[in-house]
Image (tube, rainbow, N blue to C red):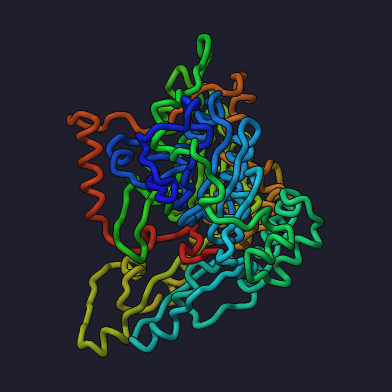
Amino acid sequence: MNIPFLNRSEGSSLPTGVTRPTWVVLDIAGDYPALSPGNPLAALLNRQDTLEALGARLERLAHADWLHGVLLRFGQYGAGLSTSRSVRDLLSRLSIHKRTVAYLPTLSMPALLAASGAGQVVAPESAEVNVLGLGIEVTYLGEFLKKHGVSFENLRIREYKSALTRFSDDHMDPYNREQLTRLLESMEVTWVAEMGTARGVSEEAARGWLERPLSSAQAAREAGLIDRVAYEDELVGPATRPMSAVIDLLKPPTRRGKQAGRIAIVPVVGTIVTGKSQRNPLPLFGGVSAGSDTVVAALRRAGQDKATKAVVLYVDSGGGSALASDLIWREVKVLNEAGRPVVAVMGGVAASGGYYVLTHARHVIASPYTLTGSIGVVSGKPVLEEFNRRQGLNPEGVTRHEAGLAYSSARPFSAAQRELMERSIAEVYDRFTLRVADGRGLSQERVNELGRGRIWSGQDALEHGLIDELGDLHTGVQRACELSGLPYGSPTWTATPKNRGPLPEFAQEAADEAASLSVKAGLPGTGVLMWLDSDLRVK
């Protein structure tokens, strides 16, 4: 990292009488996914900073007895509210040991939430102020697709389940508008309360930041949103150095005595699919997928590891395949019944199949900003009948049974096929609500009232009994220690499947990474889905 205004290189001498830097500048930038990739090759290729890595750096800074303070320089910060709350907590723990100053060129709701863990928040006079409230925008493709001869079959349970409506409809229906409005309301109420507490102002004053939007850094300071208006060069002294210049001076915290055991972390990140976890580079339905084979194998490895006393299941997924979700759920239940407690922690989203997999965890934790719930089921397909006619295409199928071509895109569902699909998703929904009722200690009737495909914030989910506690991965590891009788600070490890073939493990992982590039784009498997629309983003 280069800091031009310091006018000195990383290797230049410090002021006379100073042997080590007194302040360090640490960049805070990026999306901050929770965990580093589990396999060595993916970790080597990964260029994203993670919460795990940030926490490790901050812990080292906290224990550097020669260090007075840390300037946290927010750059291209792209994390959402759930992650920002975790960053805030990391900075709060650092602030116990060191002076901390957060420098924000852009004042946004997530960045301000993250920076509120620092002792002081500063912005330049020219800072961009974007504290305008939260919003969600969904682009509906139904009319566009029809113009091109494509329609979309959308079978769902029930009225709030909107995973496929952007493909089948041309506008937002009242049920979706209702649930999204409530979601935003809950998140804004939480943000106002947390920021009001952090800034030492009343909730009424904090609410005013959203109701009467601020337009400048000076106005933000006068309203109590930040502490000071200053430029970056005004915040550093001659004994300030960038993080890269002090790496060799920072020692990892030592763990004394014999370790009684460790905690395994098993991630479920991305669309839940059958088979192996993969990375799909394609744009529409691309991204990371959580394969049931990979997740189940990781859970089994954690269960077989004698040193592992508890498991933290980290879920950041909007669901996907109903089958894959059930296979992961089963392994979580088996681990718990075998006396290996599983604590589930939700990331930014743990909805539909992402909620299903954790219903039988011993303890469930979420951020108040998590998108969760969506207890519902959906199935459907694109119909290219008119498109094929326009293009002179004539798909013809041969089957001995009408249901055999139910998922053919050449024609809509027949009456018999539709009846079969509706019966199938009804059975899956009944099993879903039964799993939630059993795992959460609720009646199935109550789960149906909370379900019907409805999305909830983590805060609302806590009030409805769908989770146990508000927190993050740090909280989850602490609860896992408590349930297993381990002391706080016990080591953790990210569980991955054992070596799967004749190649050495590193080479096998390289082959898997290469193979993942050949994945086809599409919906997360055919059949019945427990899926939250991946296009849903709170801004």
> Would residue 438 be visible to someone looking at this image?
no
Q: Is residue 276 left or right of residue 443?
A: left
Quadrant containing the N terminus in the rendered view: top left
Q: Is residue 322 left or right of residue 466?
A: left
Above or below for 384 versus 229: below
Q: How many marks?
A: 0
Give x and y (percent) for residue 96.
65, 33
The residue furthest left is: 502
Residue at image position (42%, 77%) is 152
Out of 286 and 26, give the one closest to the viewer. Answer: 26
> Would residue 270 be visible to someone looking at this image?
yes
Give x and y (percent) for residue 533.
49, 64
Above or below for 3 versus 136: above
Out of 449 and 66, give the one closest to the viewer. Answer: 66
Out of 139 and 111, give the one closest to the viewer. Answer: 111
Residue at image position (36%, 82%) is 150
Quadrant containing the C terminus in the rendered view: bottom right
Give x and y (percent) for residue 464.
73, 51
Give x and y (percent) for residue 345.
57, 41
